[in-house]
Image (spheres, grey):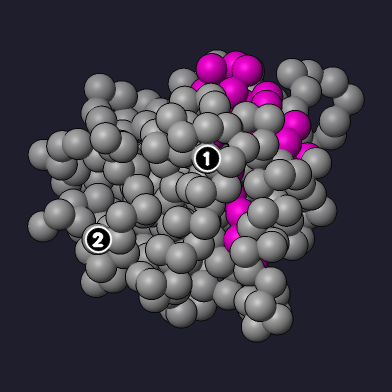
């Protein structure tokens, strides 16, 4: 069966010192949570402090982005081997904020997922429709385009995790209903089956992201095709993130 994963995306919040404090509190709070993978993704500048504070715990530290080349003249960028060298185990790729504000495309998502997997790290690849696309009835077509353009070549890699994050639900307090999320997840799993076969469709983890909170996680996780969550705002506080990690109660 698929082990659930709860990942925290801290976005552009927390200094190195603050990150270490949160990690120290969090590791004690989630120690007893078994059969769930836990990952926290601080900004680049806090990664080393976070890795050190999480050492020996069940928490994996992840990055929020990367470049696809291993080195080169790319001012401001950070490569996957550089992240691996710090002890980072996971990288988020293709978050909608990167797509919206920093020109990320399905083609760059494809290259970045390939680089993360080639260097042996886990990858949380994000996709999801905007409100306008949902209202125009294009949700499933958008998801299909994003999977085919960014994910298709990598689907059979066991370290690839998909995160469905409807853009209208991110940071807005408007969570997708469990039924809306399940519809998208079921569609994605069926599409993965078409592209990579039933074994991959059965084993790939699909996380939901967008205003996940301690009080809505259980209903979301009750859906058969939801395998975890990518949590933004509610992951910044160790107590609320730990409650989400312990969604089984
Ligand atoms: P949110 O963010 O939980 O604050 O809506 C989720 C995300 O952007 O991954």
Q: Farthest residue to the bottom: give it.
A: 135
Q: Secondary structure at mark 1?
A: helix
Residue drawn at 24 percent across, 60 percent down: 222
Question: Which span is picked out in magenta?
Answer: 108-130
Please indicate whether residue 218 sits to the left or right of residue 2 in the image.
left
Q: Position of residue 184 (x, y in %)?
A: 50, 62
Q: Quadrant of residue 68?
A: top right
Answer yes or no: disc 1 within 8 Å of ligand 1: no
Q: Which residue is mark 1?
A: 193
Position of the C terminus by quadrant: bottom left
Q: How far is disc 2 from disc 1 in space, using C-alphas? A: 22 Å
Q: Earlier in the sequence, mark 2 or mark 1?
A: 1
Residue drawn at 69 percent across, 72 percent down: 138
Q: Which residue is mark 2?
A: 222
Q: Farthest residue to the right: give it.
A: 73
Q: Position of residue 229 (x, y in %)?
A: 38, 53
Q: Secondary structure at mark 2?
A: loop
Residue drawn at 57 percent across, 32 percent down: 196
Residue drawn at 37 percent across, 53 percent down: 225
Q: Which mark is residue 211?
A: none
Q: Is residue 127 magenta?
A: yes
Instruction: Report how many numbered discs are placed on residues in the image.
Output: 2
Q: Position of residue 16 (x, y in %)?
A: 47, 41
Crowding near pointer 1: few (<14 within 10 Å), some, many (20+)?
some
């Amino acid at each position: 069966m698929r082990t659930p994963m709860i990942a925290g995306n801290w976005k552009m919040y927390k200094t190195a010192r603050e990150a270490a404090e949160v990690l120290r509190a969090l590791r004690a709070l989630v120690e007893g949570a078994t059969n769930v993978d836990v990952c926290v993704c601080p900004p680049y500048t806090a990664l080393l402090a976070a890795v050190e504070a999480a050492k020996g715990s069940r928490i994996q530290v992840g990055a929020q982005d990367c470049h696809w080349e291993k080195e080169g003249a790319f001012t401001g960028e950070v490569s996957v081997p550089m992240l691996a060298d710090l002890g980072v185990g996971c990288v988020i790729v293709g978050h909608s904020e990167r797509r919206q504000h920093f020109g990320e495309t399905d083609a760059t998502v494809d290259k970045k997922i390939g680089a993360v997997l080639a260097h042996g790290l886990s990858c949380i690849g994000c996709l999801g429709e905007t409100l306008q696309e949902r209202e125009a009835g294009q949700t499933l077509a958008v998801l299909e385009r994003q999977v085919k353009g960014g994910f298709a070549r990598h689907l059979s890699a066991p370290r690839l995790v998909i995160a469905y994050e409807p853009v209208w639900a991110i940071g807005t307090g408007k969570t997708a209903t469990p039924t809306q999320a399940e519809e998208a997840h079921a569609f994605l799993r069926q599409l993965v089956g078409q592209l990579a076969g039933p074994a991959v469709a059965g084993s790939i983890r699909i996380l939901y992201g967008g205003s996940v909170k301690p009080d809505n996680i259980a209903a979301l996780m009750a859906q058969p095709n939801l395998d975890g969550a990518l949590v933004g705002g509610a992951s910044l506080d160790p107590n609320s993130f730990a409650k989400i990690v312990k969604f089984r109660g």
